[in-house]
Image (cartoon, helix red, strand yellow):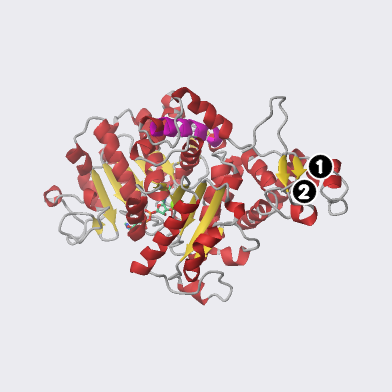
Amino acid sequence: MQTHTQDGREPAVKTGLFGYQLLTDPRFNKGTAFSQAERDQFELNGLLPPAIGNLDEQVSRRLQVLRSFETDIERYAFLRDLQDTNETLFFALLIENLEELLPIVYTPTVGEGCEQFSRLYRKPRGLFLSYPQRSNIERILSHPSFDDVRVIVVTDGERILGLGDQGAGGMGIPIGKLALYTGCGGIDPSATLPIFLDVGTDNAARLADPLYIGWRHERLRGQEYDDFIETFVDAVRRRWPNVLLQWEDFAKNNATRLLERYRDRLCTFNDDVQGTAAVATATLLAAMNVTGRPLAEQRFAVLGAGSAGCGISAQLTHALVEAGVNAKEARGRFFLIDRDGLQVEGAKEYASFQRPFVQAAPVVQGWKLEQPDRISLLDVVRNAKPTVLIGVSGQKGAFTQAVVKTMTTNCERPIIFPLSNPTSRAEATPEDIEHWTGGRAVIGTGSPFPPLTRDGKAFKVDQTNNSYVFPGIGLGVTAIDATRVSDGMMMAAARALAAVSPALGNSKDSLLPPIASLREVSVTVALAVALQAHSEGLVAHPVATDEIEGLIRRAVWVPRYRPYTRGR
Ligand SMILES: NC(=O)C1=CN([C@@H]2O[C@H](COP(=O)(O)OP(=O)(O)OC[C@H]3O[C@@H](n4cnc5c(N)ncnc54)[C@H](O)[C@@H]3O)[C@@H](O)[C@H]2O)C=CC1
Ligand SMILES: CC(=O)C(=O)O
Ligand SMILES: [Mg+2]
């Protein structure tokens, strides 16, 4: 991290790079903004056009080019190329235009980026650790360019957004998430490392694609898979004992299992399980200001009993208990519906992460059902009368008109969150929900949607996405060297986000702060997370409570060109 000297000038960064190598290293490249003195010192004369520019000019030039493309996937490819050419410029552009660019760097366009990854692939970024290279992992991680790594996002590509198994194309997700760690959370980009664990793919189209860049092999499972993950985690712990490791977009049979296996062995969390739970909890707490009905009175229907559905239900159960509901009753408030219908005792074998949210058989006795052998979402909404409906199933249109309209018979202001990503997988569009409920629903979506019209004015749709929390978790954890990510830290993140809800002061306002303010939101989340880690004794070095905010603020990386000096 760079700091200012006492006279306010930044210390120069030493680099052994010069000439063409300096211009082709995205961490050091300044493009046309290299000064004449730097061009002389680093042998750049002739390699650059003569005009000397600056970061602001470069940002406006790139923005013009970006806006001239016709499609978002072209914009995505352009931004990925810029990131791999000049990181400072990429992040300056991103940070100054968060609201416009997040839907490209992140959901929904990143989904298409993953699907097209083999075609778009240009330059190396991060690490592809493939099964055939398993005995080399330690050597691969040992490269000096990774010495400063503090945050890793890792995927095996099996459940990419709601798009399923994308094989090596899944690498687009760790790259996108880490772009937000820097763009929103202020983590120094040289401290971030995207990793793809290539254990093959079961995506037949990818395996048959001659241009596929991944390991052309069916997905490994069972002991071979577990041993590979163990080798990876062991190598990570040895190389970076205090790194924050974020698991992302693993399939449901692995996500919670791996989290439980490793959460006490290193500083780690699963974003789909825990990050999603934190943002959903925060948005719901904020929604209480709009509906006027306290959390302790809510009943929940959750479509999709996977990583996100069970993670959300677990954290909300804690929140209900904290609000005074007893634990058994709190769990009973959750109705989780998967492919086979409502999770209910005796219907089938449930995975261990699903079991806490299996309804007792007597609860559904006497329910009127559409079909006798299956309890559908509509049956649940009719009979259990939930006040909150959450979609994390990846199933477009699963919140039908009948389901949504029935929600309005349960309560005056139903809370309806179709959280699946990307946009094409949302369980319902805000426009339809607004129409079907006559404007009574409180809405949150996973991906961005255009504003609604309410009382003749544009009304922003809240994007209930874990991007509101994971960058702040990363900033808080790394700023104070937290050793673990606890449930308490996740709850602190959720409460901190809820506490900055615009709806707190005005029940007609948004539930979440604007996307454009994500950098400030992340500092707020970081502070809450760091204070909680401190109070739980989960910090590597002693630090005074009143120093924590300063540590966080000083840790925030800002894109600007630093002075360089030649040396090793
Ligand atoms: N807004 C946000 O921040 C986040 C959104 N998500 C989205 O949530 C979705 C699910 O993610 P995960 O839980 O990690 O995936 P998952 O694969 O663990 O869970 C999805 C569940 O939905 C079930 N399902 C599939 N079809 C169904 C149907 N017709 N009816 C009911 N259930 C059905 C699956 O059997 C599975 O249990 C994805 O689209 C993902 O993009 C996930 C994490 C964060
Ligand atoms: C947002 C996110 O993590 C997901 O859709 O998987
Ligand atoms: Mg995810």
For the N terminus, the quadrant is top right
Residue 207 percent across, percent down from the top left: 49, 74
**Residue 327 image-quadrant placement:** top left
User: Pointer 2: what residue?
Assistant: 31
User: Pointer 1: what residue?
Assistant: 53
User: Which of 43 and 221 lies nearest the eye of the viewer?
Assistant: 43
Q: Which mark is residue 300?
A: none
Which secondary structure lies at badge 2? helix
Tell me where the magenta segment starts and ends, as one range.
Answer: 518-533
Per the image, is 32 magenta? no
Residue 441 percent across, percent down from the top left: 37, 38
| Main secondary structure along the magenta-highlighted residues | helix
Q: Is residue 516 left or right of residue 203?
A: right
The residues bearing labels 1 and 2 have C-alpha atoms spaced at a distance of 9 Å
Q: Amino acid at mark 1?
A: Gly
Residue 131 percent across, percent down from the top left: 46, 68
Which secondary structure lies at badge 1? loop
Q: Residue at x 46, y 30 (%)?
A: 527
Crowding at mark 2 (Cα within 10 Å: few <14, some 14-19, many 20+): many
Q: Amino acid at mark 2?
A: Gly
Crowding at mark 1 (Cα within 10 Å: few <14, some 14-19, many 20+): some
Q: Is residue 526 above or below residue 544?
A: below
Residues at discs 1 and 2 in contact (Cβ within 8 Å): yes
User: Is any atom of residue 504 visible in this view?
Assistant: yes
Q: Is residue 271 left or right of residue 560?
A: left
Per the image, is 521 magenta? yes
Q: Residue at x 71, y 33 (%)?
A: 10
